[in-house]
Image (cartoon, rainbow, N blue to C red):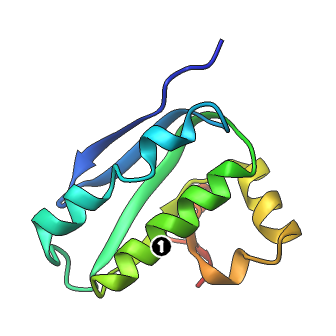
Amino acid sequence: MNVAPDLSGDEAQGYALSGEIVFDTVQCLMDALRPHLERSGSGSDSGAVPVDLAGVTRLDSTAVALMLHWRREAAERGRKLVLRRPPASFKHILQACQLDSLFTVVDDSAPGEIVNT
């Protein structure tokens, strides 16, 4: 049984993604960030759009497609997607696909540590 994914949060606090990001659930999230991007303009000085992935319970390679899609939507609006606390399995997928250099990843296991940009 898949746990439906959810995107919650706001511009001031950032966004949190939770649930399962797999083939059967990813489609409902493809356009979930767009209204937030269109509504908020650029709420932070840096134009960063932080998305916390700590609540993701299961994912597959379709999560990479989702993050690439969100990255493009943010960039089209002059913003930068920042991934916070991604699961180790997600970081491994990014590395295996040689996509890790496309994302800014903040790993809160060491406060403020930016893994890559």
Quarter of the figure that contains the C terminus = bottom right
How many neighbours does mark 1 have within 10 angstroms: few (below 14), some (14-19), or many (20 or more)?
Answer: some
Q: Which residue is pictured at 36% across the width and 53% down the height?
A: 31
Please indicate whether residue 44 sits to the left or right of residue 29 in the image.
left
Q: How many marks?
A: 1
Quarter of the figure that contains the N terminus = top right
User: Which SS class for mark 1?
Assistant: helix
Q: Quarter-wise, where is residue 80 in the image?
A: bottom left
Q: Quarter-wise, where is residue 9 in the image?
A: top left
The residue beneath circle 1 is: 71
Q: Which residue is pictured at 17% across the width and 60% down the height?
A: 12
Say if 116 sits above or below 111 in the image: below
Q: Nearer the viewer, residue 13 or 90?
A: 90
Residue 40 drawn at (x, y percent)? 13, 67
Q: Which residue is pictured at 17% across the width and 67% down the height?
A: 38
Please indicate whether residue 25 sits to the left or right of residue 5 in the image.
right
